[in-house]
Image: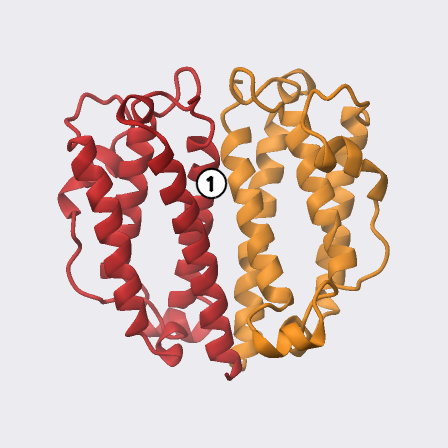
Chain colours: A red, B orange
């Protein structure tokens, strides 16, 4: 493996680790527990499940991999805070969406060459990218990996 | 920059981002708030501050960068859970240790060449590393970065 390929392997392992850990924590919560607050007055587990689905679903667009699966959920889980009075999809629908989004991402990630991971993402101009080649697709993946970890630490607080 | 250098830059940026965010959250808490639980019955902020210091302090050894600054704190913040009845250093000492450990790490990280980041860390044999070159120093840094994010999401829950 060359350094680029090693890097992509590392970053994808790091991503997979957080996605798997999060899946395990969400699976360990029954529906009632999922609707509990992570701490008094804070977000509910179900909001964080939706939030992570929506943010990670955004990677399809970000990486030019085609359409998002759930672009219509941004209002509920991204543009508005929890308990804003918006309807949420049902718990089974959310649980299935978690699986679908991450399975499709894993599949699509395989089609991105090591070279392409080091290229700019869709929200960046060629000019900006020339100035800072570290702002590539892989750096977005690293950020999103840390984003999962951040909320995972919170979901893990729900009492079982 | 070659791919290795770009990768190191990305990973260090990702690390710096989490360290800075965590510093900001800890700084925003006064001593009384720092000693509060992140959620009822859970870890206190002060334990997580100590825990992150100790785990990140471990990187000096892991990367062969010399002695740790606070190896004697492992009992309080790593080998035992919070509220195990062990004495903690005072809050000012902990706050200063956070600064010292991360300043020294930042300084030492500069001395690691891009090539060396892709080499094995101290807990790994040459043989294991040959089998999986993605288990290098940089992969440890990525894991530790996600580890900060995980607990940062929790510390952010402390009410101000």
Q: Residue at x 23, y 60 (%)?
A: A104
Please state which of residues A31 and A109 is positioned toward the viewer in this rendering.
Answer: A31
Location of residue A81 with respect to B136 vertically, above or below = above
Q: Please tell me which residue lies in front, B128 or B63.
A: B128
Q: Position of residue A95 (x, y in %)?
A: 24, 39
- The spot of residue B95 in percent (x, y) is 74, 33
In front: A122, or B115? B115
Q: Quadrant of residue B78?
A: top right
Residue in the image at 53% along x and 80% along y: A3
Q: Residue at x 57, y 51 (%)?
A: B145
Q: Secondary structure at mark 1?
A: helix
Side (left or right) of A94 relative to B137:
left
Chain hosting mark 1: A
Q: Is residue B33 left or right of residue A118?
A: right
Name the image quarter holding the N terminus of chain B. bottom right
* Residue in the image at 63% along x and 74% along y: B129
Q: Residues within 10 Å of mark 1 (few under 14, many from 20)?
A: many
Q: x%, y% of residue B144?
A: 60, 51
When asked about the image quadrant of residue A32, the answer is top left
When the figure is inspected, residue B6 is found, relative to residue B15, above or below; the finding is below
**A86 displayed left or right of B48:** left
Residue B57 visible (yes or no): yes
Numbered circles on residues, count: 1
Please state the horizontal and vertical placement of residue A75, each as a whole percent of the image. 19, 36
- In the picture of the structure, the residue carrying the numbered disc 1 is A150
């Amino acid at each position: 493996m060359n350094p680029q390929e090693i890097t992509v392997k590392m970053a994808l392992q790091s991503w997979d680790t957080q996605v798997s850990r999060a899946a395990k924590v969400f699976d360990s919560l029954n529906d009632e527990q999922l609707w509990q607050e992570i701490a008094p007055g804070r977000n509910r587990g179900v909001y964080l499940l939706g939030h992570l689905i929506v943010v990670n679903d955004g990677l399809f667009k970000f990486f030019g991999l085609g359409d998002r699966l759930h672009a219509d959920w941004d209002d509920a889980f991204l543009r508005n805070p929890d308990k804003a009075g918006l309807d949420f999809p049902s718990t089974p629908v959310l649980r299935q969406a978690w699986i679908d989004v991450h399975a499709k991402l894993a599949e699509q990630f395989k089609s991105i060459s090591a070279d392409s991971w080091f290229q700019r993402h869709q929200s960046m101009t060629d000019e900006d990218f020339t100035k800072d080649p570290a702002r590539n697709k892989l750096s977005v993946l690293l950020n999103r990996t840390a984003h999962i970890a951040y909320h995972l630490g919170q979901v893990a607080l729900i009492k079982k």
